[in-house]
Amino acid sequence: RKAKMVAIIERYKDKVSALPTNAELHLCKYEGFWLLHGYWFKSQTDFSVESIMALQDGFQALPTDIFLASNPKTGTTWLKALAFAILNRTKFKTESGSCETHPLLTISPHDCVPFMESDSFLNNPSYANGLMATHIPYTSLPKSIISSECRIVYICRNPKDVLISFWHFVNKLEGDVSTPTKLDDAFKCFCLGMVPYGSFWDHMLGYYKASLERPDKVLFLKYEDLKKYTENEVKKLAKFIGIPFTEEEECDGSVRKIIELCRFENLRKVSKDKTQMSKDICEDVYFRKGIVGDSVNYLTTEMIQILDKITKEKFDGLNISF
Ligand code: A3P
């Protein structure tokens, strides 16, 4: 396993060394976006720019594949759980109608739906079973994802809440190995677009425009809508991925059961238990509060004004609001 990933790093060494780099933030700029470079989180290769280059060169999508795309901290984990539960709703249903054997009751949504640019996927792509996630910007996706006409579901979220979620995430990941990142610094980097897969706004715009151009292939969802109109959005998602709920399912509570299975508190409990069992991973880092608007408790009025101004300028003339 390790040998394969080392070979990937080696293969793209020259290409990567020519890119603009910010060593302190472990980022380099590739095709207009800041991507991870060097040792970050678990390894040097997980989510690295080299992994993305390897996918661009060698990944072959199938027309039946479904990709869950997102900026980090926008609700990826939730979307993974929902899409997995929708796709596998008959497989894990027992005769009594309950689903006590469901994988989401014991393992993380990240184990059910891999990120394409993760070490585990690159080492064993077949385990994805046609449902994958990615943080890769739209314009940098492997070409076959677009040409093979497969479906992409993108989830976005209010940038202010994303910043706060990201800031907590980074500090939780780094734990006590380094001094915590100050909110001021995280804010500056976020506004400059110098965060993994940044700029946040350009990432979102890429998928938003694609959803307008190819509405049958790219679905654009909002975390806030998923919170507020959960049942509607879940039905929309099921329809888009090609397996709409039948009338019978709507009546027998199938939609409600999926929503319940993927509820924040339930997924968090599973991840907490898992984190306790295997001390080397910290799955509950993906679950913090799971609410809308928490950023007002952290951001100053000036920070809010600046973020709102960037959002307004970037989305000028487009029908996106939070
Ligand atoms: P907060 O930090 O604001 O709580 P991602 O999965 O893209 O990393 O996003 C993480 C954010 O989604 C975190 O936001 C997390 O708490 C929230 N989240 C995770 N699971 C969720 C769920 N089932 N329902 C609602 N929000 C959820």
Image (cartoon, rainbow, N blue to C red):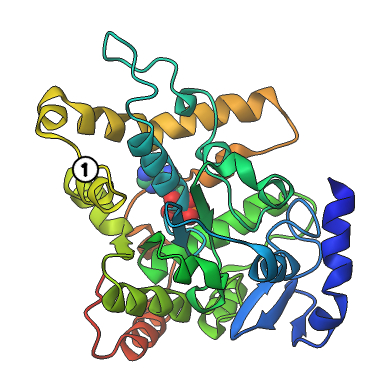
Quarter of the figure with the N terminus: top right
Residue at the spot x=57%, y=70% of the render?
142
- Residue 322 placed where, x, y %? 26, 69
Q: Which residue is mark 1?
A: 244
Residue positioned 78% across, 75% down in the render: 24
Q: Outermost residue toward the top?
A: 96
Q: Is residue 45 above or below residue 109?
A: below
Mark 1 neighbour class, 10 Å CA radius: few under 14, some 14 to 19, many 20 or more: some
Q: Nearer the viewer, residue 157 or 155?
A: 155
Name the image quarter holding residue 308. Answer: bottom left
Rendered location of residue 205, percent (x, y): 39, 79
Query: Is residue 253 in view from this perspective?
Result: yes
Q: Secondary structure at mark 1?
A: loop
| Residue 61 in the figure: left or right of residue 15 | left
**Numbered marks: total:** 1
Q: Give x and y (percent) for residue 38.
A: 81, 67
- When the figure is inspected, residue 82 is found, relative to residue 278, above or below; the finding is below
Q: Residue at x 32, y 57 (%)?
A: 223
Q: CB at mark 1 closer than 8 A to ligand 1?
A: no
Looking at this view, is 207 or 169 the one in front?
207
In the rendering, at what x and y percent does residue 291 appear? 34, 50
Query: What residue is rendered at 55% in x and 29% in y?
Result: 107
Q: Is residue 315 above or below residue 57?
A: below
Using the rendered view, name the quadrant where residue 321 is placed.
bottom left
Does 265 sit above or below residue 307? above
Name the residue nearer the viewer: 156 or 152: 152
Give, as a three-letter code, the residue at label 1.
Pro
Q: Using residue 157 as the reference point, say whether residue 67 is left or right of it.
A: right
- Using the rendered image of the protein, determine whether residue 263 is visible from the camera's viewpoint: no
> 215 and 296: which one is in front?
215
Examine the image and state in which quarter residue 310 appears. bottom left
